[in-house]
Image (spheres, rainbow, N blue to C red):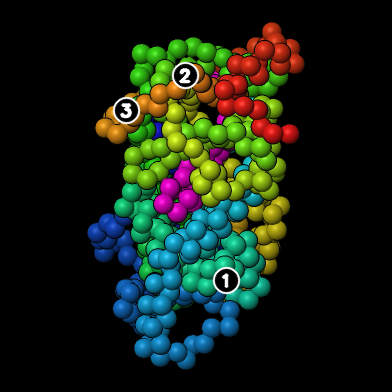
C-alpha cells in the first residue's frame, strides 16, 4: 500500500498603497524556481545584489544570533558569548520530550481550528490540510513581526508554553527530514526589494529558507511539481501586482503500511455519505489485518491506528452517528491520550476505501475568522522592512492518494488469536490525522465525506439508517458507555 500526502502553502507580502509602476521595472512579476533540501545555488539565483549585505554573511549556528524567543523586548546589547549560551540552552530545551510534546499540541490546536474553517462543496466534498505547513509559515512570518502583531501570531501558534519556540521548530524539522517526510522552504524577493538582513538570515538559519529572486510563475510551478514528485502542477496562475516578498513551503510524505492490503481483495463496496445517500467505492480489504482499535466514549466514535514504516501513522476517528463534527472534535480530541489508550493490535477484517483527493483554499478568510485579520489590514512587519507592509494572499493546496502499492513489512505478520473474528469497516465519513509517532504531532489533518466524488450518489434503501449501524460497528467491541 502506498500513501502520498503533500501540502503547499504560499504567503504573499505586499507594500500598502504601492502603485504598479513603483513595484517593478520588469513585467510580469518574476518568480524563482525552488529546489528542495539544500541545492547548490548558481550565481544567478542568489539574493539581489542591491541588497545590503548581512554583517554576519551566510548564516550558520556559529555566526547567527538566533531568535529563539519572541523578539518583543529583546536586548540588542547581548554579547556573542551570551548569544552562544542562549543558543546552547535553547537547543538542549528543544530536544526535551516535554518541549516536543508541547510543540505537537500547539500544531494540533492550530490545525483543528483551521480545519473547522475549511469550506466544502460538490467539487471539494473532502478536506485535507497540513497544520505543520501552516504553522511553519506563520512562525516564519513571526520573525518579521513586532509588538502586537508578533504577540498575535505567537498566541495563535500557542507558543506560550515554548520559550524557545523557533529553536523547537528547527529541531522538529531536523527530525522530520530524517524520516519519509520532505520539507522544502523558500523566500522569494521582488527585484529591487531589500528586506532587513536579520530577517533573511534568521529565516535561513532556523527554517532553512534561502532568499532567491523572482524569475517567473512557470519556474515556480516547475519547482512545485518537482518538489512534490509530480503530484501538483500549475500551482500558481497569478500573483498580486504589488508583491514584494513571498514565503512558500512544500511538505511531501510517501509511506507504506507495515501491514499491506492485498489488491486481490479490493472490490466495489458502498460508502454511506449520510443516512440517506451512499456511493460505490473501491474498497480495500484485509481479511486478518492487525489493527489497534478502540471505542472512545467522549468522542462517541471508533478510533483506529494504521502504522506506517519509519515512525509515522494514520489515526482515524469514525463517529458512531456517521457525521464528522470538527468543532466538537476540536474541543474533545486529545491525541496523546488516544495514543496512551490504544490497545494491542488484534487480527480482524478491515475495510479501507481507496481514494485520491485534492483540496485547495485561499486561507485569508479562515485566518481572519480565527482572529488573525490584522495580518491583512495593518500588521507591524517592520522586522522585514521599513514602511507599511501587509499580507495579501495565503494559498494552501494539499492532496492525498491511497492505493495498494508498496512493500510489505517483515514485522506485520503477528496475529492475535481470539474466539471471535471482529471487523472494522471505514464505510462512512471519518476524520484522519497523519501523525509523527515520536512527538505525536499531526502533519496532515483531513475529513473524508465521499471517497469517490466523481460517482453519482444514490438513495440508500435503509432510509434513516436501519441496518447500516450493524454493518459499521462490530458488537464484540461493545458500545460506548452512556
Residue 398 in sight in this render: no
Q: On screen, 299 above or below 368?
A: above
What residue is shown with label 3? 413
Residue 165 is left or right of residue 19, and the answer is left
The mark that comes first in sequence, 2 or 1, is: 1
User: Percent position (x, y) of residue 460?
Assistant: 68, 11
Q: On screen, 232 above or below 386?
A: above
User: What's the CA distance linking mark 3 and mark 2?
Assistant: 19 Å
Specify the segment rendered in magenta: 430-454
Residue 151 is left or right of residue 291, and the answer is right
Label 2 neighbourhood size at 10 Å, few (<14), some (14-19), many (20+)?
few
Q: Secondary structure at mark 2?
A: loop
Residue 327 in sight in this render: yes
Residue 271 included in the magenta stretch of the image: no
What residue is shown with label 1? 145
User: What's the CA distance linking mark 2 and mark 1?
Assistant: 61 Å
What residue is shown with label 2? 419
Amino acid at each position: 500500500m502506498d500513501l502520498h500526502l503533500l501540502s503547499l502553502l504560499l504567503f504573499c507580502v505586499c507594500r500598502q498603497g504601492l502603485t504598479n509602476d513603483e513595484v517593478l521595472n520588469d513585467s510580469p512579476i518574476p518568480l524563482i524556481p525552488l529546489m528542495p533540501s539544500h541545492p547548490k545555488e548558481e550565481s544567478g539565483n542568489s539574493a539581489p545584489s542591491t541588497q545590503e549585505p548581512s554583517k554576519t554573511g551566510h548564516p550558520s549556528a556559529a555566526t547567527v544570533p538566533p531568535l529563539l524567543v519572541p523578539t518583543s523586548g529583546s536586548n540588542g546589547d547581548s554579547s556573542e558569548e551570551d548569544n552562544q549560551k542562549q543558543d546552547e540552552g535553547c537547543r538542549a530545551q528543544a530536544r526535551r520530550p516535554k518541549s516536543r510534546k508541547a510543540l505537537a499540541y500547539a500544531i494540533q490546536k492550530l490545525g483543528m481550528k483551521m480545519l473547522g474553517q475549511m469550506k466544502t462543496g460538490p467539487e471539494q466534498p473532502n478536506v485535507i490540510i497540513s497544520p505543520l505547513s501552516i504553522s511553519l509559515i506563520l512562525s516564519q512570518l513571526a520573525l518579521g513581526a513586532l509588538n502586537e502583531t508578533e504577540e498575535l501570531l505567537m498566541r495563535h501558534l500557542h507558543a506560550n508554553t515554548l520559550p524557545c519556540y523557533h529553536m523547537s521548530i528547527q529541531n522538529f524539522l531536523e527530525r522530520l527530514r530524517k524520516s519519509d517526510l520532505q520539507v522544502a522552504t523558500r523566500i522569494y524577493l521582488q527585484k529591487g526589494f531589500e528586506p532587513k538582513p536579520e530577517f533573511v538570515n534568521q529565516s535561513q538559519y532556523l527554517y532553512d529558507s534561502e532568499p532567491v529572486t523572482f524569475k517567473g510563475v512557470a519556474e515556480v510551478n516547475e519547482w512545485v511539481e518537482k518538489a512534490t514528485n509530480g503530484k501538483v502542477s500549475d500551482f500558481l496562475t497569478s500573483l498580486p501586482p504589488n508583491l514584494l516578498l513571498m514565503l512558500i513551503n512544500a511538505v511531501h510524505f510517501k509511506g507504506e503500511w507495515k501491514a499491506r492490503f492485498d489488491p486481490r481483495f479490493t472490490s466495489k463496496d458502498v460508502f454511506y455519505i449520510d443516512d440517506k445517500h451512499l456511493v460505490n467505492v473501491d474498497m480495500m480489504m484485509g481479511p486478518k489485518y492487525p489493527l489497534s482499535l478502540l471505542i472512545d466514549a467522549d468522542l462517541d466514535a471508533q478510533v483506529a491506528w494504521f502504522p506506517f514504516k519509519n515512525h509515522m501513522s494514520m489515526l482515524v476517528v469514525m463517529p458512531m452517528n456517521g457525521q464528522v463534527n470538527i468543532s466538537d472534535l476540536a474541543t474533545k480530541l486529545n491525541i496523546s491520550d488516544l495514543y496512551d489508550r490504544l490497545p494491542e493490535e488484534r487480527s480482524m477484517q478491515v475495510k479501507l476505501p481507496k481514494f485520491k483527493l485534492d483540496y485547495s483554499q485561499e486561507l485569508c478568510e479562515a485566518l481572519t475568522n480565527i482572529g488573525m485579520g490584522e495580518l491583512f489590514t495593518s500588521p507591524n512587519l517592520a522586522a522585514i522592512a521599513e514602511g507599511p507592509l501587509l499580507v495579501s494572499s495565503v494559498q494552501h493546496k494539499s492532496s492525498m492518494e491511497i492505493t495498494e502499492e508498496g512493500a510489505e513489512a517483515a514485522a506485520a505478520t503477528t496475529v492475535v488469536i481470539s474466539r471471535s473474528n471482529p471487523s472494522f469497516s471505514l464505510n462512512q465519513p471519518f476524520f484522519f490525522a497523519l501523525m509523527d509517532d515520536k512527538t505525536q504531532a499531526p502533519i496532515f489533518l483531513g475529513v473524508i465525506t465521499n471517497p469517490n466524488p466523481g460517482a453519482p450518489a444514490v438513495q440508500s434503501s435503509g432510509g434513516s439508517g436501519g441496518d447500516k449501524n450493524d454493518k459499521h460497528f462490530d458488537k464484540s467491541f461493545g458500545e460506548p458507555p452512556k
